[in-house]
Amino acid sequence: MTIAIVKTNPNTKSRVTFADYLTYFDGSDTKYELVDGELVAMSLATGKHGGITKFLVRDLDGEIERTGLPWIALQGIVGVRCPRGIGLDTVRIPDVVVMQRDDWQALQEREAVIDFNLSAPLLVIEVISPSTKNIDYRAKRTEYAARDIPEYWSIDPLEAKVSVLINSDGWYDVTEFVDSGLLISPTFPELQLTAQIILKGA
């Protein structure tokens, strides 16, 4: 997704706290991430981007239902609070989040952000665009690993590949999938997905 940094006050270096972020509203429908205490606006995704995320949520929810797991897959509506910097907050909004259903229920009457008092998501997925390539491959990789998220997928339509990152001792080991090779996912070991199918989307 495309992002643009929003300066809350160009004449100061004031930062937005996590508590302020939870209640922030600028009168528009714009969604914001919080990155090192700074608001970052998220623009509308492309149709291809939306098709891929919609397909993944539908497919993952089908697998969750088939296996009877107490999880839920959600598309772009849940924030994940990540440790980053010293005393500065970061909240990312992944394209897809797979989380415990009980934790999702706990968010029904509050802001939909997975704080440190809830379990880390089981899986987060980002669909890469030209403007977010470095962020998705570098910054988010570090942040999600620090949050102890066990599995992270980077879907890259630009290079026609899917990277599955598995958390090992606080860092991710990466396996790249292209064409018709079946994805290997510890979270969903019986999932029958290929990079080709995912990149085609819904």
Image (cartoon, grey):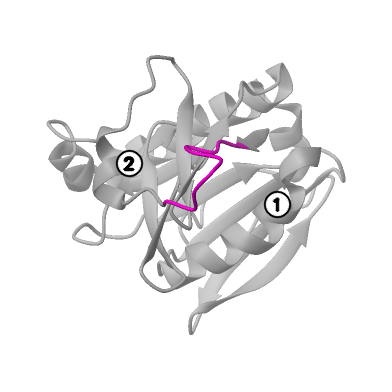
Q: Amino acid at mark 1?
A: Leu
Residue 8 position within the rendered picture, expressed as x and y whole percent measured from the top left: 47, 37
How far from the left and from the top, in percent, is residue 20? 27, 42
The residue pinned by badge 1 equals: 182
Q: Position of residue 122 (x, y in %)?
A: 39, 56
Residue at (70%, 45%) from the top-left corner? Answer: 155
Q: Is residue 170 above or below residue 42?
A: below
Specify the principal SS of the magenta part.
Answer: loop
- Which image quadrant is residue 42 in? top right
Q: Three-letter amino acid code at disc 2?
A: Tyr
Q: Is residue 167 left or right of residue 97?
A: right
- Between the C-alphas of marks 2 and 1, the distance is 39 Å
Magenta part of the protein: which range?
5-14
Instruction: Please tell me which residue lies in front, 87 or 124.
Output: 87
* In the foreground, 142 or 194: 142
Q: Which residue is the site of mark 2? A: 21
Q: Is residue 89 left or right of residue 153?
A: left
Q: What secondary structure is marked by label 2?
A: helix
111 and 53: which is toward the camera: 111
Identify the residue shown where x is 70% and y is 17%.
47
Q: Which structural element holds mark 1?
A: loop
Q: Residue at x 25, y 34 (%)?
A: 23
Q: Nearer the viewer, residue 183 or 97?
A: 97
